[in-house]
Image (cartoon, coloured by chain):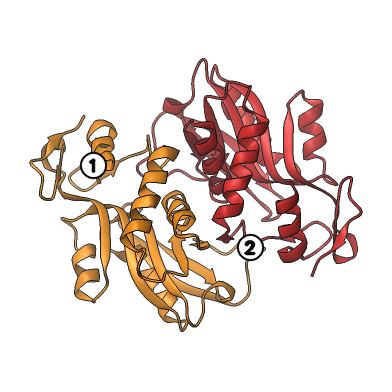
Chain colours: A orange, B red
């Protein structure tokens, strides 16, 4: 998705060989027009798959997940990263390790909102080691619903999550696939690579 | 906003005299069409106020905040509830006590995204004691930006936050104002009240 890649080139900050900061349009400040285009693109990619619900994870998955759900005309559910007082019963849970934050979190979804016959599109902002995606898959597999596809805004293709998910048979559609963050440069897959910052 | 009130009447669950659970369309599963209407309504209410940015708080503020920002054609920033590895420098912070969760959280916004000349519309899902709203106001006031208005999806008008904010001179627009949750019933202000659950 060219608009997204331009945004990453112009505003992304390469903090290390593994960390790309996109706080100006995705992870802290959000560009709603870009998110709308991202949602449209996901809806286009999965339009023939009979998606019944989008599943994402708080907080940075909510914006792309909501816009994808809006354009697919289905509800979106966001997995919670810890239990809250008003979300307690009948939870589906999975453990997710974040390499960026160096911590393991329990994520949870109410059983009430995913069930037999549901065809789930998982959406997330980043795909690196695939921990969040596999956690969300575990949750869906614990119901009688099906993981129909996985839509990722930015895939760090030099980390193993994308390959693992594809090797497991899942269809993964990433709108920007980063080959390398070496030398403070963002190199996209099948691109000549453009310097940022 | 009649569509929202209908949704609250039909799907809201009154857990106690102070807790209304709306996990089926706002706080866990999200109805994107309803959020789009909510965003349109906020944009309509504040269309003449020269809003330059929307400010909300993770996680449940993101959906209505994003849709309001989309229809106002401005960026949205979501305050973080704790520091993350990729969001560390130049933070504006405030303490927010949640009566629902019985805990105090530090919320933070990067100084980079709010500054002189900004006219900020604060958006949140619920208004009860006003803690989150006052925390977000504190953050804006620590910059040279201005709080131009506050948009709330559901106001628990029997709690003091809305009155305190209005007494402090802020314009607060709530799309549904709840007078009482007594006897497991949702009663709206200036409405005859309808039973839920």
Q: Is residue B69 visible?
A: yes
- Identity of the residue drawn at 36% across and 63% down: A47
B23 to the left or right of A18: right
Count neighbours of disc 1 (C-alpha within 10 A) and say few if under 14, some if 14 to 19, many if 20 or more. Answer: few
Chain for numbered disc 2: B
Residue under label 1: A2
Q: Single out the residue that lies furthest toward the front.
A: A48
Q: Which mark is residue B23?
A: 2
* Coordinates of residue A28 in the picture (x, y in percent): 43, 39
Q: Is residue A14 visible?
A: no
- At numbered mark 2, what does the secondary structure look like: helix, strand or loop? loop
Taking depth in this image into account, of A110 and A51 the one nearest to the observer is A51
Disc 1 and disc 2 on one polypeptide chain: no
Taking depth in this image into account, of B75 and A51 the one nearest to the observer is A51
B43 to the left or right of A106: right
* Coordinates of residue A142 in the picture (x, y in percent): 45, 81
- Identity of the residue drawn at 58% across and 20% down: B50
How many discs mark residues in the rendered view?
Answer: 2
- Residue B96 versus residue A126 in the image, above or below: above
Chain for numbered disc 1: A
């Amino acid at each position: 998705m060219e608009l997204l890649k331009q945004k990453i080139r112009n505003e992304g900050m390469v903090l290390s060989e593994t960390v790309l900061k996109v706080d100006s349009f995705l992870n802290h400040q959000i560009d709603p027009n870009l998110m709308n285009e991202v949602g449209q693109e996901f809806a286009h990619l999965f339009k023939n798959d009979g998606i019944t619900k989008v599943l994402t994870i708080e907080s940075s998955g909510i914006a792309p997940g909501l816009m994808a759900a809006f354009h697919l005309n289905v509800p979106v559910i966001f997995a919670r990263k810890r239990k809250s007082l008003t979300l307690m019963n009948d939870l589906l849970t999975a453990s997710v390790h974040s390499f960026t934050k160096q911590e393991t979190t329990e994520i949870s979804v109410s059983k009430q909102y995913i069930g037999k016959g549901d065809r789930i599109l998982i959406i997330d902002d980043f795909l690196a080691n695939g921990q969040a995606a596999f956690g969300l898959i575990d949750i869906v597999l614990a119901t009688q619903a099906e993981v129909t596809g996985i839509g990722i805004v930015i895939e760090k293709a030099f980390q193993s999550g994308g390959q693992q998910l594809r090797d497991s048979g899942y269809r993964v559609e990433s709108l920007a696939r980063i080959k390398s963050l070496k030398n403070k440069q963002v190199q996209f897959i099948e691109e000549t690579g453009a310097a940022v910052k």
